[in-house]
């Protein structure tokens, strides 16, 4: 049975950037309510002190984008510190599992709502993300990953890979009022990188 085109494109992309020295674990979705959505865990190595969680399946659907300049195919990723415990059964613990849950939930959001997602979009949470004070998530382009890695060739199209980055309430409100670039300026001024840190500074707390 031939692999779906989107799946083959992502597999070929990963082969281009990672080799046999890289360990990649697949959290294979056993029960899919709509479309099949796996999460790849690209483990840290001696040259990379963080994990990459990356979706594979969102691009099986084309999104309802407002114009042809916006890619109608996306996948999502989250960067985790190397200490984040996903080995053995530890990934099932709520405090460890929420990044996977976030990828799956936001990955299904545009299909459920017949809409699209792109740079700067924010998705609020009903409750704070467990074990954190984060209340929303923003889609960004990673500064840690290369721009080339964040564009996956897919026939005559491109699958855009977006980074999910959790926000505090103050940061969400600031972004709504001032725009994504002003928020990113604050992150830069405070040397906030895009690897998840549940204890990181709230850059809008005193604004």
Image: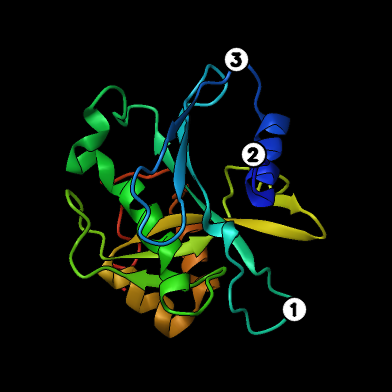
Picture quarter with the C terminus: bottom left
Location of the N terminus (image quadrant): top right
Q: Which residue is mark 3?
A: 21
Number of marks in the image?
3
Please, what secondary structure does the residue beneath circle 2 have?
Answer: loop
Residue 118 seen by the camera: yes
Q: State the residue at coordinates (18%, 43%).
A: 94
Dot placed on the residue nearer the N-terminal end, 1 or 3: 3
| In this rendering, position of residue 159 left or right of residue 181 | right
Residue pictured at 35% horizontal, 46% vertical:
100
To which residue does mark 1 refer?
Answer: 68
Q: 120 above or below 132?
A: below
- SS class of the residue under badge 1? loop
> Does residue 64 sit above or below 130 in this rendering?
below
What residue is pinned by disc 2?
Answer: 1
- Tell me where residue 122 sits by quadrant: bottom left
Residue 48 place in picture, x, y as percent: 54, 26
Q: Nearer the viewer, mark 2 or mark 1?
A: 2
């Amino acid at each position: 049975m031939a692999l779906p085109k989107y799946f083959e494109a992502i597999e070929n992309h990963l082969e281009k950037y990672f080799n046999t020295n890289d360990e990649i674990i697949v959290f294979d979705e056993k029960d899919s309510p709509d479309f099949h959505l796996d999460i790849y865990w690209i483990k840290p190595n001696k040259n990379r002190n963080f994990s990459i969680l990356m979706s594979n399946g969102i691009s099986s659907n084309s999104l309802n984008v407002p114009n042809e300049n916006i890619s109608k195919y996306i996948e999502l990723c989250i960067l985790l510190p190397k200490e984040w415990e996903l080995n053995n059964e530890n990934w099932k613990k709520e405090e460890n599992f929420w990044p996977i849950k976030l990828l799956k939930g936001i990955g299904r959001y545009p299909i459920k709502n017949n809409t699209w997602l792109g740079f700067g979009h924010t998705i609020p949470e009903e409750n704070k993300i467990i074990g954190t004070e984060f209340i929303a998530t923003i889609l960004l382009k990673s500064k840690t990953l290369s721009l080339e890695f964040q564009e996956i060739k897919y026939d005559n199209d491109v699958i855009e890979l977006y980074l999910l980055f959790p926000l505090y309430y103050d940061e969400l409100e600031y972004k709504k009022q001032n725009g994504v670039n002003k928020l990113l300026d604050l992150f830069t001024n405070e040397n906030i990188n895009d690897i998840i840190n549940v204890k990181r500074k709230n850059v809008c707390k005193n604004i």
